[in-house]
Image (cartoon, rainbow, N blue to C red):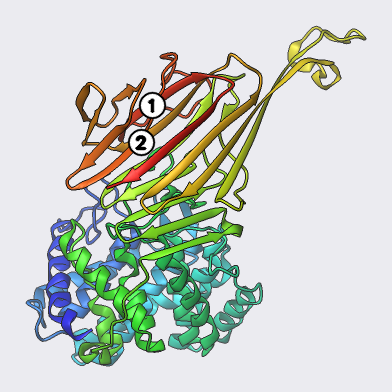
Amino acid sequence: MKKHYTEIVKACDRGVARLLACTITEPGHPHYGGIVNKADGLVPPGAGIGCMLTYVPAYYTDTSKYYKSANLLKTMNTALEYTEAIQREDGTFDLLISNFYSAPDTGFIMHTMGRVYKIMDAHAKTEIELKLKGKLYSIIVKAAKGLRDGGFHTPNHRWVEAAGLSLAYNITKDESYKDMALMYLAEGIDIDENGEFTERSPGIYNAVNDNALMILAEEMNKPELAGYAAENLEMMFRYFEPDGTVFTQNSARVDKGEGMPGKSFYPTNYYHIYLKAAYIHNNPRFAKMADLIFESAGKSEAGVPGNLWLYMIEDGLKKYEPVLEELPDEFEVFFKPSNIVRKRKGDYSATILGGAPNFLFIQKGRLRCYARICASFFAVAQFKPAEIIKTECGYRMEFKASGKYKWPFETPSKTSIWDDMDHSLRKSVNEVDLTFVIDIAFTETGVKLNIKTDGCDRVPLKVEFCFSGGCGIEGTGFIIDGNAGNSIIVSEGNVKASLGLNEITIGPGFAEHKYTASMRGSVPQSKNDFTVYFTAFSNIDKKIEITTG
């Protein structure tokens, strides 16, 4: 995009400087030429070649401070030599934190190498540049064999590997790579009617799939594959929060942030995808999203994305001045297959989530709150509803917990060794249930909750609301700092949390006991948020209103 280009070049230059600062430059070092991760001390193979996607565009861009830099050219040669040295004999690369002889990680690396090769193929002219290109070609040929003959772990790996194979095919013309890519594609794309992939991963793997499918569409001349990516990119509009982050708590992968539901995911990884999709589909909504991501990234710690490589591969992007169409910031959608309801109105959002203990999320600007419920009932009564049911007034969630006891064997066991006994033969007695029914209705500025329990009485239970750590908390008779990891039990009135100009109010509170953080069977109290507890004994019929201001 024309108005982004100058800043993209600067961002790429900053990326070069950061990578050079992490490069091992001592000759004789076992990882000479590699990029060290200073957080854990590892030298990832992917980074050793991944740096080329930053170095090469900077080297060939005349407005970059590294344009035709002899020192950078030398560094690129060292990076390729290191990559040759650590590439496995079968052509694959390792992911040091978990995967070895890994075809999937080789697929990700092939995306990088394929893009770098395209740029070098178009711009390499001198003898040393052509030698560098030849060295990269040799690594690609070897990696392609490992990619063809290797396997995968997860659904997204199929498209990652197929995309890598398609790039290898067009570089080497080896038909076996194309054949394997088509074998993966013959399984069909795992996307539902809402545009959601199997892994439901808005923070990471949706972007991975979209990227891979767009590569495949281009390299295999199958434009319909880019259409699948476009469907997911459209769906993603409903996952962006008021502060520009991505809601990820329905993910089936690591971006769910298990135990850290307050963690923020910024969509910088989507910038090049939305920009490329806007360009090939002439889509003003995608163009607007790329622009929003660019602007918000510039204001965040992530910084402007340094995707200069895309501007070199798609040369027209340097002068691309698309129409920007405003995106929807007011909607209510129920993605039933994904078990999620998303509500948005300007700078307020609400999410109902099935299959998770954190069943309700509210966000106002940067201030977040999520709710959960648990009862001290046989350590199995953490409210985790299996589904969301649409009702006339809103949505309903139900959950049933059961407890029971066992008798001695009516026919004596043949063994006295506990672990060798067939405990399925024991009779169950004193069975008892506890049922939760939660009704949720959206209002103009928030949510109304009606929480009911039925079954076993006298059971201690808690309703907890977890607010962004560092917020302010005030209620009837108190004003405190909402520091992360701390909590309060509120017995009456409303509680207001504030962060900057944003506020969320919940209430009225109730408190009949102090059994909260240590409750058996409950999710541990959040260390990243401030928790407000309401407590009672079953059975209850409580109404709680959440408002934003």
Mark linked to residue 506 = 2
The residue carrying mark 1 is 509
Q: Quick one: 171 or 229, which is closer to the camera?
A: 229
* Residue 344, percent from left and from top: 39, 59
Q: Is residue 66 above or below residue 201?
A: below
Of all residues, the one furthest to the right in this rendering is 411
Residue occupying image coordinates x 27% and y 57%: 243
Q: Is residue 300 above or below residue 363?
A: below
Q: Is residue 389 left or right of residue 344?
A: right
Residue occupying image coordinates x 33% and y 65%: 269
Q: Is residue 3 left or right of residue 358?
A: left
Counting every numbered tag in the picture gives 2
* Residue 456, percent from left and from top: 66, 19
**Dot 1 crowding, Cα within 10 Å, few <14, some 14–19, many 20+:** many
Quadrant of the rendered image containing residue 125: bottom left
* Residue 398, percent from left and from top: 62, 39
Circle 1: element type:
loop
Q: Is residue 22 visible?
A: yes
